[in-house]
Image (cartoon, coloured by chain):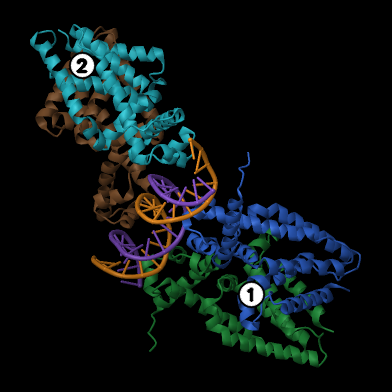
Chain colours: A green, B blue, C brown, D cyan, E orange, F purple
DNA sequence: TATGAATGAGACTTCATTCAT
DNA sequence: TATGAATGAAGTCTCATTCAT
């Protein structure tokens, strides 16, 4: 039985989720405090806890929301044509996610650094399935002699690693370059360079 | 006047640093607790605080120790010859660091996720200098027509991202593959694939 | 923007200040514990810390409140007429303060015994100004041949010393006489004797 | 059975007592820490605890030592002749004690502020006897019409209060005058003024 | 006699959570 | 729905004291 949610409820829950995402992104599920989230959400602590019963519940909701966005991102991707097209498209999608959901990406990073206790169960199976599919596609390309014979899983990790890096390590990137993915020119340059190297790296 | 450190002091301080590295790697500077570190170090909390006056002090010492190892890693790298040789060597070194200092790498990751408040001041200048040098070398290669014309900084980020990924996201990698870099065969395979793709990606 | 203080807030903060005054009076800023203050204030420790963020903050507030009362005491005093009248009035005021704010007086005593680290900055200038004025008045009296030629500053110290003594050393006084300033007869007797001796001591 | 004390033992115990006096003078029996005492005594904490089994024991020894000096001070005083002579002598002795044992005086002050739990039992009887004697002497003077009819106990308190004030509140006095009793000229001036006022205050 | 090492008790403070309104 | 007030649990850190050498 789905509880009916009033308009204000939806708005405030989203406020909490957004604030929670920012704070969990910085300090992880343990380091984050409800106070910080409440302040960032612009509401009192007890009021926040009126919408989410506990810190854990907020965390789960944040993880879930980010997860949904992430899965949506992956699902928008399709094996549409040539490896070149497909890989380019895949990198594009991942870069977009890093730019549009940088904080969410960092929440994931923190969760994984903590050993992924929640994520493991939330998306273990699902992710293995997705990765399995990707692996099969890449293996097909190799068999068809469309790309070099590389170990598919590491190509996937490479793409994940690089694209997430721009979100997760943006503090470091900003220190070194003064830019983040919010800078359109920098964004395009990063995407272009990465795509270029990977395509040249795998295409025959 | 440097205080003399007895044998047991050195041993226990190292015990604390090792335990601290593990715990900070998982939970970050805020999420980690002295209790956890003490337990992992096999000593009582007050005894631990006999060696390091505060949690912050442990954290700083951990960061510094990891930093030194990391800088040592980077400094062992030399522009020895061809781009191929040099890049291969660089990737090798970084992979080695990820395998041998996975926890340290994760401490860094956490620190950067928190906005790198300490690291920024600890290695801001130093890192910019190092990256500046690397950038210049790569630009030289491009000018000499030895590699494709790519934006150097993103190549550097790529290599960092990928190699660190194996350390920082090992929980995820383990879930998906059942392996970590401790598995010699997996380690070699990862290194080989990554090196291959990047070399082919940049060499003419 | 001054935060509005609700009725209960004012009451509870005053409860804490009163309890704090008692405890700091006995044990000083270091020896006093939040537990004692909380218990005496009849509230839980975290609740107390809801009103004052730290022990230091309580201490500062106690000092400040006592200071204000003390300054008010000094300011109610006026050079109204003859030395006799004026000195009598001054001693009266000080005795009143010792009786009505014995604990506060002891907080001051403790603070000064600790070296007055806070008080010095809180009232350094102010007190010097006040003492300067008093000194000038006394010197005027001497010049006008109204009182004996004594060193004014020591007369001031004498009055302070004696009047505060009844508050600060009341434990000793009680042991020896079985009385405190709360005993009206004893109070009057003390005030009368002290006034008598000092007046006869300085008047021509 | 008195334990034999070696030369070094005597020296070190005195070091601890001296350091303890300084520290207890500032922070009272509760606020003082063994660390502070040990550092000021120039020895390690365990070594200090080799000479005194506990903090309480140090405190008791400090109190006792100061007490002995104080009693000695009082006993050197004799009713030698006229009230003038006797009172002058008494004030002299007390001023001397304040100058030579300022820290000890402050230890007493702290102890009394804490309610004198130890002192009460250590010198309750003794002090009452002494004060009783003094009172009788003064009453004799009054009966013999040598001094004005004042309440003796308050004269005694006055002298105690004033002389101790210079030791106990020296921090305040130093702020206001820039001097302490260590300044010979200031010392004499204070003693002279106080003596003058009190003598004129009580003599016929 | 001296000290580095260790620890239990306790003090300060934070934080998730609940209560009352 | 909102919030000021309250609290138990937990975390950081200090301190008196003991142990081992």
Task: Give the spatial CA distance, label 2 vs label 1.
Answer: 85 Å
| Residue located 58% across and 74% down the image | A112
Which disc, if any, is residue B170? 1
Image mark 2: chain: C
Quarter location, residue A84:
bottom right
Instruction: Give how far across and how far down residue C83 sits, in percent.
Output: 21, 15
Question: In the image, is residue D188 above or below residue B200?
Answer: above
Instruction: Give how far across and how far down residue C121 sits, in percent.
Output: 41, 33
Quarter location, residue D3:
top left
Image mark 1: chain: B
Question: In the image, is residue D168 above or below residue B87?
Answer: above
Q: Residues within 10 Å of mark 2 (few under 14, many from 20)?
A: many
- Residue C119 visible? The answer is no
Q: Residues within 10 Å of mark 1 (few under 14, many from 20)?
A: many
Which disc, if any, is residue A181? none
Which one is in front, B125 or A37?
B125
Give the position of the N terminus of chain A as an image quadrant. bottom left
Residue D34 placement, left or right of A151 = left
Instruction: Give how far across and how far down residue B141 sits, in percent.
Output: 88, 65
| Residue located 29% across and 45% down the image | C20
Query: SS for tag 2?
Result: helix
Disc 2 target residue: C198
Residue C185 placement, left or right of D98 = left
| Residue located 34% across and 27% down the image | D104
Disc 2 and disc 1 on one polypeptide chain:
no
Quarter location, residue D70:
top left
Circle 2 or circle 1, nearest the eye: 1
């Amino acid at each position: 039985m789905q509880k009916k949610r009033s308009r204000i409820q939806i708005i405030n829950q989203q406020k909490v989720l957004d604030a929670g995402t920012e704070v969990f992104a910085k300090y992880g599920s343990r380091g984050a405090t409800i106070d910080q989230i409440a302040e960032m959400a612009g509401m009192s602590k007890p009021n926040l806890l009126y919408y989410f019963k506990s810190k854990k519940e907020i965390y789960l909701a944040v993880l879930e929301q980010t997860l949904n966005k992430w899965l949506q991102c992956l699902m928008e991707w399709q094996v549409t044509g040539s490896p070149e097209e497909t890989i380019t498209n895949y990198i594009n999608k991942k870069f977009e996610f890093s730019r549009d959901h940088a904080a969410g990406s960092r929440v994931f990073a923190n969760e994984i650094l903590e050993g992924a206790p929640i994520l493991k169960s939330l998306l273990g199976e699902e992710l293995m399935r997705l990765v399995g599919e990707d692996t099969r596609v890449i293996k097909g390309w190799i068999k068809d002699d469309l790309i070099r014979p590389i170990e598919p899983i590491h190509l996937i990790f490479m793409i994940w690693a690089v694209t997430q890096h721009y979100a997760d390590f943006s503090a470091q990137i900003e220190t070194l370059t003064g830019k983040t993915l919010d800078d359109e020119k920098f964004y395009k340059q990063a995407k272009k360079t990465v795509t270029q190297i990977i395509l040249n790296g795998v295409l025959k």
